[in-house]
Image (cartoon, rainbow, N blue to C red):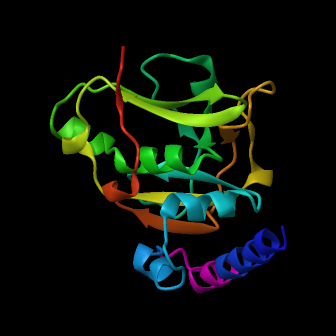
Amino acid sequence: MENFKNEKIEIQSFLEDLTTKHSDGSVVERDEIYKSIEEFDLENFLEKIVSLGFVIHGSSKFFETAKPHPAKDANSVPENEHFAIYATDLPAIAIYMSIVSNDKIHEQKKSIHWGAGVKYINNKRIPIFSADQDLSSVMDDGYLYLFRKENFSPVTPSQMEEQFISHESLKPILIIKTHPSDFKYSVQPLK
């Protein structure tokens, strides 16, 4: 337990250093994190950050301030129809959202339905990913935006806290660039 406590303090200190260095809104390149953390894995690093009270928004687009906007949900799921900024406390989902480029989908004149969700096995949240086509041609570098969780609320009160929204424009605490290689999961065929 002491080891985890020390690791949490180290991650918090490292995060404070990064946010100070990038307070101008500049993007944190992964190499900057790699240099400081042995055996770096973006998802594991983000899980530690989330445990400190943060949520993550993944996008293929760069912006300095996140602004509420209508969600793009082809399935019209009520939880996904808010005019808001969406964020998650599951790093794998944020990474997935950051590397699938809707711009590339439109450029290639494709009609692709894709998404992410969660299933529960023995009360453990497992992220799941799906698409109705191969996504490799529409994956690209993207961005993760870190926000304080206190500025967000769960989409639905009964929800198990994997999706959060804010109806206010927010400046991210930190912006981290992602690459398709950061995504370590398989994408299941959408049925």
In the image, what residue occupies the spot 74% across and 46% down? 152
Q: Position of residue 39 (x, y in %)?
A: 48, 74
Question: Which picture quadrant has residue 189?
Answer: top left
Q: Quadrant of residue 7?
A: bottom right
- Where residue 115 appears, as percent x and y from the top left, is 43, 30
Is 25 above or below relative to 100?
below
| Image coords of residue 34 (percent x, y) | 46, 79
Quarter of the image that includes the C terminus: top left
Of all residues shown, which one is farthest toward the left?
108
At x 64%, y 28%, the residue is 121
In the displayed structure, 154 sits above or below 132; it is: below
The number of numbered discs placed on residues in the rendered structure image is 0
Tell me the quadrant of the picture where the N terminus can be found.
bottom right
Query: Viewed as shown, does residue 185 lie left or right of 19?
Result: left
**Front-most of 151 and 178?**
178
When asked about the image quadrant of residue 87, the answer is top right
Image check: 62 left or right of 189? right
Residue found at the very far top of the displayed protein: 191
Q: Which residue is at the front of the view, 160 or 59? A: 160
Q: Is residue 109 left or right of residue 87?
A: left
* x and y, in percent, of residue 190 in the image: 36, 20
Q: Which residues are magenta?
A: 16-26
- Membership of 23 in magenta stretch: yes
Q: Is residue 33 left or right of residue 151?
A: left
Please give the name of the residue rendered at 52% of the width and 67% of the height, measured from the top-left corner. 175
Residue visible at 63% across and 78% down?
Answer: 19
Say above or below: 84 vs 115: below
Front-most of 46 and 83? 46
Q: Is residue 94 magenta?
A: no
